[in-house]
Amino acid sequence: MKRRKFLGTVGAIAAPATLSTQLSNPSFSQQQDGQPQPPADDPRVFIFDDGRHAADLYSFEPPITPAEHASIVDQLAGSGADALVYMAGVEAGSVLYDSKVAALWGATVKKWTHYVWYRAGRILNQLIADGHDPLKIICDRCHEVGILMIASSWVSLHGGNRKEHEGLGRWTAFTLDNPQFQVGEDPDPRAKGVNQHRFNFLHAEVRKERFQLFEELLSDYETDGIELNLTSAMPFCRFSEVKQLAPIMTDWLRDLRLVADRAQQTQGRRKRICARVPAHPGAWKLVGYEIEKWISEKLIDVFFYESSYSEDEGMVQDIDCTQLVKLTRGTSSRVHATLHTPLGRQFAKYATPAMIWAGAANAYDQGADGIAIGDHHWTPNGWPWTAEEYNTLRQLGYPQLLATANKYYMVRSSDRQDASLEWLPGRTDALPKQLAESESVEVSFRVADDVSHWRKLGRIKSSVLRVRFANIVPDIDEIRVEMNGRELPDSILERVDMNYRLVGQGSAWNVLGPYGYAYDFHLDADHELAHGRNDLKVTVLKKDHDLAADILLAEVDCQIEYRLHRNFELQPVEY
């Protein structure tokens, strides 16, 4: 029996309870009752992949067999992922399959100017010449291993010019030869940093080109639906034109819904329309998205909500989806958190499993229906995947497993803030922040765990709040840290020296930065994390005046580790 069918057989149709509701249920705390599973045709865990980086198109030399082209699907078999969101088209219009309405990757190239992208073009042409449609290979293999296949592409096309872009293979004749469709310069100050070469969706020709592509993906292939990327390069017009765009975008979606419904009848396969959208409701009006109307008219089946940050800014665990969840309750629309995993810390490029579990738990705790890992390719340990990736995925679809999974919560810290999105609501200030003498900084973070409940059962191994400072002199500087209005005492504090230290191979460049100290508070029953929002206030009471540099609040993290049972240690003997 295929996994999806099995889940539908044993699962309940009712909407899942939130994590906070489950934690208050004694039977759940004892892990006797399972989380109701979604219906068979409602996947809970989606994996995005562009089918190029961690797959044959970039990594394998031609010629390629159909089975080798399906390798990106094969890794998902039995992984815990229910659906693949496959990026069948790219931002500049070209596609990765034998389309009748869009140009194949590299179709406009006279001489290639990109070594790796040239290989992708060779492989696609070879497969098609051998009588294989690359997209059909992906669809068929998804269904063979029992997962859904959602075909994705950009809605915002990016324009270019022949001189710079023709040899890259990503641009089509349509996006190269129609500069009149580009949004162009926009005097609105919010347009600073937004790609001015993106196409304006107010042009009927642009809407038609995109419509034909998604129509083909729904009607001519045995996909399980499509995914509309509605977050990249927003808005799809000048800022002054957003009010004009909103009803046009809704009409375009209505027409697409009709196509999906017809294809569903013809193929006997459910055809979902999924859409990637900002989580914050204030953003919807600013970019012309009539979300309430899309829900009431059943235009969108699955919303993949994202924070008001670019993918490059990486992991954001604390995304408020309450309004979107509220609007969709009692409707046919489902809400899935989209997590991006780039981390950018000194020793970790990608989020760890505990960080991903924390973000997922926060989403379920607010009533989200599921999780999506939305990176172009999720390869924290390279490709092919390791056991770590499979262990991470295995738990993502089960809130009751996540309840006692180790978690690593983080206040957002970044030196890569995207200026092109600063106008969007829902953005929180990122650390680091400067701290002058007699000044305070306040930060806030969400915690899905009911730590007090699990501590009473002896399940909490440790709960550590780490407040990391740069330029602090702990024997002179005096710092007060308050959590939820209560001062954290020195009795639970451990200072960790993070001044200059050689790490890694020991070269002069491999040092531990930023220089300073971590203040680790080993939380106990008297100083407990709250379920939900936790507010932290840091105050400099006294500053060493011999050091000119200001103290920086660099990072705030909270790590929770669980035992399988009270007094049960995984490694009771270390020798």
Image (cartoon, grey):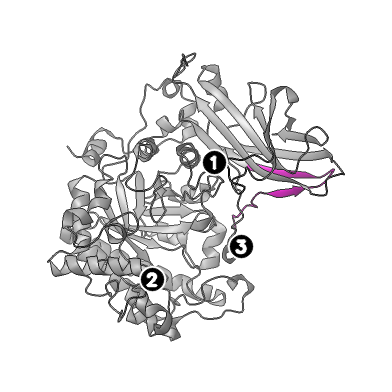
- Residue positioned 48% across, 36% down in the render: 354
The verdict on residue 456 being magenta is no
Q: Is residue 254 visible?
A: no
Q: Are marks 2 and 1 in contact (CB under 8 Å)?
A: no
The residue identified by callout 3 is: 422
Q: In the drawing, does residue 143 fall left or right of residue 570?
A: left
Q: Nearer the viewer, residue 390 or 545?
A: 545
Q: Is residue 120 visible?
A: yes
Q: Nearer the viewer, residue 226 or 87?
A: 87
Instruction: Mark 2 or mark 3: name the one nearer the start of the chain.
Output: 2
Q: In the drawing, does residue 392 fall left or right of residue 511?
A: left
Q: Secondary structure at mark 2?
A: helix
Q: In the drawing, does residue 77 fall left or right of residue 309?
A: left
Q: Residues within 10 Å of mark 3 (few under 14, many from 20)?
A: some
The residue identified by callout 1 is: 504
The residue identified by callout 2 is: 251
Q: Nearer the viewer, residue 222 or 479?
A: 479
The verdict on residue 437 being magenta is yes
- Quarter of the figure with the N terminus: top left
**Horizontal and vertical percent for residue 147?**
25, 47
The range drawn in magenta is: 425-444
Q: Secondary structure at mark 3?
A: loop
Query: What kind of residue is marked 2?
Result: Asp
